[in-house]
Image (spheres, rainbow, N blue to C red):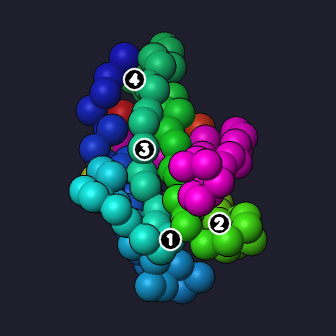
Amino acid sequence: MSYQAAAALQTAVFGALTAAPALAGVSVVDAMPPGTTPGTFVLIGPEVAVDQSDGSGAGAEHRFSVSVISDAAGFMTAKTVASAVSAAVLAGGMVLGTGHLVSVTFQRAVARRLDEGGTRRIDLTFRARVEL
């Protein structure tokens, strides 16, 4: 098992999200901004990596989350941005600086209200298979 490609995968996901025309003007971050953050933004979040090595070589399965956080009324803004996030991650073409991305699939999404309903958050979980 190797965690070698984790940073390369995050870099590729960040690149895909920031290059997506449907996400133009939406901030993409990997840490919660300090203080109150009005508006809508995308947060590259937690990851779990599991060994997927076999006789042909080293590999890992990375399950990672990308969240959409929005203070817009209702869920429509957050869902529209989440749809664009999903499309960007699944579009293909992500190239890793370390390893080879075999596949990326959508696993699930959880939408919920935070801050007594003042904020919407949608956590999307993806599965990436990486060979080294």
Find residue 54 and name its label.
none
Q: Quadrant of the C terminus?
A: top left
Task: Return the mark for residue 45.
Answer: 3
Percent of width and height locating residue 127: 59, 38
Give the mark nearer the N terminus: 3 vs 2.
3
Magenta span of residues:
99-125
Query: Would residue 24 be counted in the magenta stretch?
Result: no
In this image, 103 relative to 44: left or right?
right
Q: Residues within 10 Å of mark 4 (few under 14, many from 20)?
A: some
| Mark 2 residue crowding within 10 angstroms, few (<14) / some (14–19) / many (20+) | many
Mark 4–mark 2 distance (CA, rounded to whole Å):
37 Å
Image point (45%, 17%), residue name: 51
Mark sitting on residue 78? 2
Would you say the residues marked 1 and 2 are in contact, meaning their CB atoms lie under 8 Å apart?
yes
The label nearer to you, 4 versus 2, is 2
Vertical side of 113 occupied by 131: above or below: above
Q: Nearer the viewer, mark 1 or mark 3?
A: 1
Label 4 or label 2, whichever comes before in sequence order: 4
